[in-house]
Image (tube, grey):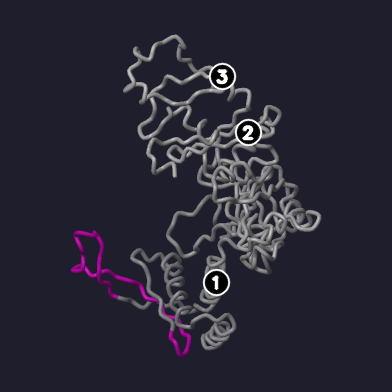
Amino acid sequence: MASEMMDALMTLCQEKHIDQLYLLDRLEQSLAKSYADIMHLVDGAKVTIDRATGKIYVYKLVPREDSWDDETGLYTEFDEVDVTPANTSRIAAAHAKMEINNIVRNAARQQIYEEFSQRIGDIINCTVLQITNDFTIVKIREGVEAELPYFDVRRNPNERNERPEGERYVHNQRLKAIIVDVRDPSSNAAPVRGEHVRPSIVVSRTHPDLIRRLFEAEVPEIYDGVVEIRSIAREAGARSKIAVSSADEHLDPVGACVGPKGSRVRAVVGELHGERVDVILWSDDPAKCVANALSPAKVSRVAIDPETGYATVVVPDDQLSLAIGKEGQNARLTARLTGLHIDIKNESLAAKLMASMPAVPAEVSDDLIDNTVEEQRCQYVTEAGVACRNMAREGSRFCGLHERMAQMDDLPVSDDPDSLI
């Protein structure tokens, strides 16, 4: 019987590509724990399997009195007493089956980890298998599953939400998603809640790179590198903006992404379940980039303060609500896309701000004016002839309030002659 069991183990190892010695070591450890419990061996048991015949030997561990370690409070050496039962085949067979299943399962998990940890950021096609209140299980291929989580992060701060607002899934529905994480099955990190029944691969439909990969698939010019996606801002499920540029000056990057009659961008919107996608032209000039990003609103003027990272935008009165967007969405996406703080004003408010500046009395004699001080004052004058009385910023002809206004009016800002060239 022992020989037959050994032959069966060796055959199974070959079929499952498991190292024979590794399996026997794992089997000995598992049997030792079981026999220690079954035979009530307080100090444990040791099991050895004859590699040639398959015969199993069970030994009782008896501690040596002179091997007590005061630091650890444990015995370090043991004598082995043979207590092998008459029949060990039944228990051995059950443990062999269990260990083989564990080894095969762990090997499959490790193989999946090694493959998909190299594919983080890739887009995948998947099919919905199971839907729960906190996550959806999707199938990538036969035997490989992934998790699309949508936990309430307020109740579960250690979890994540990768499902766009408003999306709901049904069984066997096909989806496209991005691989964002692969948990290592061999790591010692504390498992997240429910990880023992959840797949190790985590996918997302809210990540901005999902839009990037979808456009790469739909637009050959992006895949070939002629058109480049320079920036992406996304509020998943509602609206996204992407800024594109072209390495070929004769190629319109926006037109390439939109496609004939909007076919390419419609395909992307369809995969995103109706999420609105704005494609804008990228510019290395931050002011032009901000103006483009605020589309479809029309922009009158843009002034950039590189020190503070603020962009002051003036729009026609009838374009203000369009520029800001519903609940500020258009302005928020523009700020994320350009990396600037956006301050939007209509033309009427901008004119009132300039007109409210205090004027210089006309009857004041030049003899009463300290020219040294006057040279240090802001040089901005409105169309109505009203001069600002604030002190100018160091190295500038204007105060902080009017420096951006002067830039919008294309006035020289610095007193340094070299900076005006």
Residue under numbered circle 3: 384
Residue under numbered circle 2: 328
Q: Which of 101/84 is in front?
A: 101
Specify few, some or many for label 1: CA neighbours under 10 Å numbering under 14, 14-19, or 20 or more. few
* Figure quadrant of the N terminus: bottom right
Q: Amino acid at mark 1?
A: Gln
User: Is residue 133 rendered to the left or right of residue 30?
Assistant: right
Residue under numbered circle 1: 111
* Figure quadrant of the C terminus: top left
Measure the C-alpha gap from mark 1 to mark 3.
76 Å
Measure the C-alpha gap from mark 2 to mark 1.
46 Å
The image quadrant of residue 202 is bottom right
Residue positioned 65% across, 52% down in the render: 205
Judging from the image, what secondary structure is the residue with disc 2 in? helix
Q: Which of 146/269 is in front?
A: 269
Is residue 167 shown in magenta? Answer: no
Residue at the far top in the pictured view? 363
Residue 166 percent coordinates (x, y)? 71, 42
Where are the magenta residues, as a range?
50-79
Measure the C-alpha gap from mark 2 to mark 3.
34 Å
